[in-house]
Image: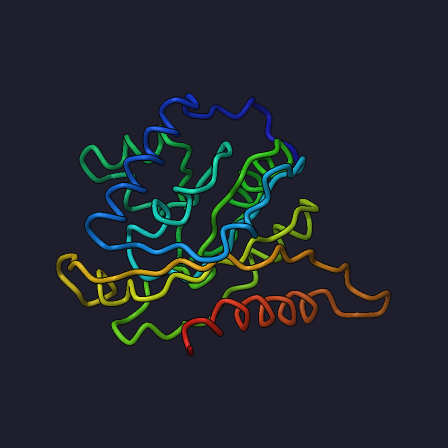
Amino acid sequence: MKNSAPIKYAPPIVIDAARYISYAAGKILWRVRYHDKQNIPKNLDSGLLIVANHQTYFDPFWICAPIRRKYRFMAWDKAFDWFLVGWLIKYLGSFPVDTRRGTTKSVLRESLGALRDGATLLIFPEGARSFPDGKLQEFKTGAVRIALEAGVPILPVTVKGANRVWSQTMKRPKFRKVEIFYHPLFHIPKPAENEDYRRHLEKITAQIAEIIGAKLDE
């Protein structure tokens, strides 16, 4: 499955500016603390899929601030209709996803194209922000399927404390301490010869969810 047109990325200077602003704002306003940044790959030749829990609209900015790579993002399709925000997220490399439909053919094509082009793609398998209790919602298998088909590793990331910042049911953001944990790279094994493909995806997805969720329980 290939993209028919070259992928357009925002200029590196723009991405770097967004990273620095996100990092500074996170540190000043939410006292964002980063853990285990040594797990972020520095010399990875292939694409990289970041998989994280989702607690606020700020998650993508906080997670990507320390990572200097070219990016593509999945974004809620409704956000593309928002004034200024829609233009900005598209310019920074986002493509629309209908969270009710999940991993459609167009989403799969965009994702595989970006990863095979060496980009970093961020996916939230929950599909929506968490509730104020911060507990993980069910992880969909699309992220693992995309990583397996693209042949790229997954960088699991845990966002902790942001459920008190701007989770579902909260009308406006608040200023609370946030922690970001980067876990060791996860290389997805291929299914065994007689293993059901769907069951394999579910098994690996559960393992990723367990890695991410463990930090929430500490």
Where residue 11 appears, as percent x and y from the top left, is 42, 21
Instruction: Report the residue at 32% width, 72% height from top.
Output: 134
Display coloring: rainbow
- Residue at the location (59% across, 35% down)? 113
Residue closest to the eye, 185 or 197: 185
Give left or right: position of 135 versus 71.
Answer: left
Where residue 131 appears, as percent x and y from the top left, is: 28, 71
* Left or right of 173, for residue 117: right
The residue depicted at 65 percent of the width and 50 percent of the height is: 153
Q: Compared to 150, does 191 lie above or below?
A: below
The image shows residue 175 at horizontal and vertical percentages of 17, 58
Q: How many marks?
A: 0
| Residue 23 placement: quadrant | top left
Quarter of the N terminus within the rendering: top right
In the image, is 25 to the left or to the right of 10? left
Residue 99 in the image: state x and y as whole percent. Answer: 40, 56
For image coordinates 64% across by 58% down, the residue present is 186
Q: Nearer the viewer, residue 204 or 38?
A: 38
Q: Find the residue positioned furthest to the right.
A: 193
Quarter containing the C terminus: bottom left
- Of 120 and 22, the residue lying toward us: 22
